[in-house]
Amino acid sequence: MDFREKTRARSKSLEIQATERDHVSIEITNDNITLQSSIKEKMESISLSHCIYKVHEQLFRGNENNYFPSLVSIGPFHNGNETHKLMQDKKWRYLNTLLNRKPYSDATLDTCIRALKRMEQKSRNFYGEKIEMVSDNFVEMMLIDGCFIIELFLEFAFKSLRRRDDICFGTNDVIFKLRCDLILFENQVPFFVLEKLFHLVPIPKECNMSLVELSLCFFRKLIPENHAHFPRKISSPPQTLHLLDLIRQHYLPTSPQILSSSNTQKNIPHATNLDSLGIRVKRAISESPFNVSFYDGELKIPSLEIHSYTEILFRNLIAMENHYPACSKHVTSYVALMERLIQSNPDVRFFRNKEIIIDGHEREGEIVFLFQKLHVDLNVKEFYYNGLCEEINGYQSRRIGLIKFGYVDSGFSVYWSVLLNSLFSPSPFSVGD
């Protein structure tokens, strides 16, 4: 073998070795990616805190209809309930409609199942109780329930997609019950499951909306009225736990909190007494009904629309805040504040005249009773409006001093003996330190 032949042979040998190294490198890289993905999924599933719980008996006792689904079960807690059989059949029809919509792929169902299988442990860990379901049944439930919600939202937003005989859109009463069932704290699936399915199933060409936008369209009657004037940045899916949480995000205050300088419980007089004390009460124009503020003797409260969804929505938001450890107590605090401000029928009339309470002509006593029913004991450190109440108290104390020394017209003095007792009486919304 001459030099040229030896060179060619050596060159070919080097090429083969390089190819083998590349092949091994690709295999190692692919193995590393697979292992990395597997480890990441396990880390996420373990670190994920429970976000969906069964409501404590002390909250639902005597009010089961506000916490348990009446028409459709979503998720594992009420799965298999015979009273929901009619809607269970509807779920299968919606699954068939969604997966067989053009553009259609035979692989769509298999892709969805594979994706849900990969997310199964993460999904199970989302619930506050161990789910006694075998793997296939759990994944099937997530697929059917998730696709039912997506198809329902699509058909609500786009009437052209509906069948004429669809019972979901036959009467307003059915839509009302569906909305109520889909906001129940016990009746949820993780939002990341919905988001994953939404990106895998064929979405009709008419739809250019995200899943969050479709959800808000379906729940528009539950979103604060002022939201239309203050478009809020729609949160990305990783920040949204489930559908109830998505609605809650649109109630949360956006203005800075008035901080409290002490851990002592603070109380304030009810609405009509505040007016008598010379504190000006005005309606605020704000994106959240929870943006209550006080400055220079002026208490500003955004309007709250009270409707047929108010009680069931607030009850389940409060349940979420009281079960999910990472959840702030904004809704619970707001209810506690309103319960103190609205003590009697004249308080309701006062807020109606100020357009702070907007309602469908419910009797005044019903509105008073509503906030009393919603009351949940609240630790003073968790009471979001303690600083606000502290500032109102400070303003009143300064005003009392000015009246005593004659710097303010004493025409209000006839009220003081009664109002001072009211002002410093024990608070109904603060318990302990």
Image (cartoon, rainbow, N blue to C red):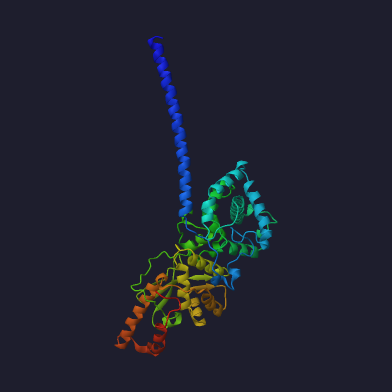
Q: Is residue 45 left or right of residue 101?
A: left
Residue 355 position in % (x across, y down): 49, 74
Instruction: Name the one closer to the observer, 339 or 208.
Output: 339
Percent from the top left, x then y, of residue 395? 34, 79
Q: Nearer the viewer, residue 177 or 119?
A: 119
In this rendering, the answer to whether 126 lies above or below 109 is: below
Q: Say how many tags the image has.
A: 0
Q: Is residue 341 above or below residue 10?
A: below
Res. 193 in view: yes
Q: In the image, 388: left or right of 119?
A: left
Residue nearest the viewer, comparing 54 with 239: 54
Residue 204 lies, with reference to residue 272, above or below; the image says above
Left or right of residue 307: residue 229:
left
Locate residue 182 relative to residue 163 in the image: left or right. left
Q: Quadrant of the C terminus?
A: bottom left
Relative to 64, residue 210 above or below: above
Outermost residue toward the top in this view? 2
Q: Quadrant of residue 72?
A: bottom right
Measured as percent of width and height from the top left, residue 384 is found at 41, 70
Q: Position of residue 385 (x, y in %)?
A: 41, 72
Q: Residue at x 47, y 42 (%)?
A: 35
- In this view of the protein, can residue 201 be seen by the observer? no
Split into 4 quadrants, where in the image is the N terminus?
top left
